Image (tube, rainbow, N blue to C red):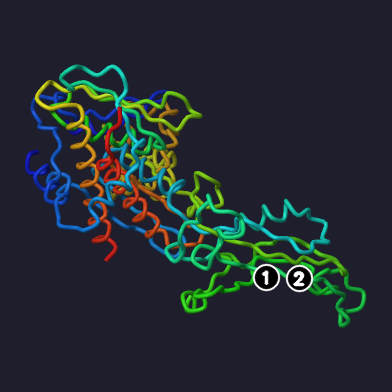
Amino acid sequence: MADNNIVGIEYNRVTNTTSTDFPGHSSNEDQSWDIEKIKNSLEVKISKLDERESNFDLVHIDTSIANALRRIMISEVPSVAAETIYVFNNTSVIQDEVLAHRIGLIPLKADPDLLTWVDTAQDEKSKYTDENTIVLTLDVTCTHNPNAPKGSTNPKELYRNSHVYAKDLKFEPQGKQVELFKGNPVTAADPNILIAKLRPGQEISLRAHCILGVGSDHAKFSPVATASYRLMPVIDIKQPISGEQAKRFQRCFPPGVVDIDSKGEAYVKDARRDTVSREVLRHEEFDGKVKLGRKRDHFIFNIESTGGMPPEEIFIKSIRLLKSKADYLRNCPIGQ
Amino acid sequence: MSTIIDEQHKDVDPDQMDQDQDIEEYDLDKIKLLPGSSEDGTAASFQIVDEDHTLGNSLRYVIMKNPEVEFVGYSIPHPSENKLNIRIQTYGSITAVEALHLGLENLSQLCGVIETKFMEALN
């Protein structure tokens, strides 16, 4: 039964890939729905959590749920991005539409909870309000630098504003946004993203309307750079491996996965670090001595935020979104 | 199982003033019954719009956990139409609609558990 939860990884195939924890599958265990059982068995272990990246384990949960959460994080958790760009003047070499696209893709540090959804049914004039739109302006003109060192060929020394960066986007709070965004003004999450390069005489003057959106509409609205999971690797040493062979065995794995004890025998120190490269299966000498696998219900999530909100918030929002999907559908009348 | 339904009824009945308004806010075209259901309602297919594998697969899993359910499966009939078909057949003691509703309630509960556990781990 214990093996039932391990996906086998062999030289050129995988085995036991489908979960079978359903009623009627096995006679000696009750597999029917039991929320108390889930409450007791579900484990969350957070191993890394910082402003941009989070790594945690979700144990004893089905793939369908883990995958739903991953999918929601990528495509359904709302975030703020520039949607409409009004170009007043652009004499740079980069075309308006390309420039607009680049600005759209810049991750913004803006709390999506402070905005409401734009009503797309309304006309262009009235749909953007101080409740649903953040206005950023970009006004740069490149000029010669009169104090440039003689003989310099570096554009940054020769000219002023030769490089336009994401930090040059200036937040213009509208109406009640002055109060609302007092403590946390909207800025680019990464200030040094290069938007365009200019030469003396060239100018960019534009206004960007940033709104709430979801990743399924456009990738710029996705709050995550990556949201992925992998299954916990399992390395099962079937027969003792010692001496020189143990050293060769150790080299089949990334550093820190396999260690050698005082008796010179190889043991698994940290399977979590393994990449499951299957290198060990290529060597005949280890035939039958080791079995590779992955725990089917142990998910190692890695969430990398684009900077709009912290990764743990994105994950929590994904859980709530899945919950609200279920709740909403539960209350929808079933039509004929 | 019955306790779960009872709890849910308590949630539905509170003396909220905007109860009627709430019902109107639900999309009447969100889910419909597809042709091919049995007379007694123990086997039925549903079509849900604007949903995908995210809900389809997790709902399939939760409904499959119900011992009264004989079969459940979902499909997305065409990749460029955002429609989700889900088929439920029960052994006879409950209807397909009941199985679907219980599945949705259980899925919602599961999300609650995950959220609580994650919050605990955060603090």
* Front in this rendered view, residue A252 or A214: A214
Extreme bottom residue here? A147
Q: Chain of mark 2?
A: A
Q: Is residue A328 visible?
A: yes
Sequence order check, earlier mark of 1 and 2: 2
Q: Is residue A195 above or below residue A18?
A: below
Q: Is residue A260 visible?
A: no
Q: Is residue A81 left or right of residue A259?
A: right
Q: Quadrant of the N terminus of chain A?
A: top left
In the picture of the structure, the residue carrying the numbered disc 1 is A168
Q: Identify the residue at image location x=28%, y=35%.
A: B59
Quadrant in the picture for residue A317 = bottom left
Extreme right residue here? A151
Q: Identify the residue at image location x=41%, y=58%.
A: A311
Q: Identify the residue at image location x=69%, y=55%.
A: A100
Circle 2: residue type: Val
Residue B57 in percent (x, y) is at 33, 33
Q: Are marks 1 and 2 in contact (CB under 8 Å)?
A: yes
Q: Residues within 10 Å of mark 1 (few under 14, many from 20)?
A: many
Q: Is residue A81 left or right of residue A18?
A: right
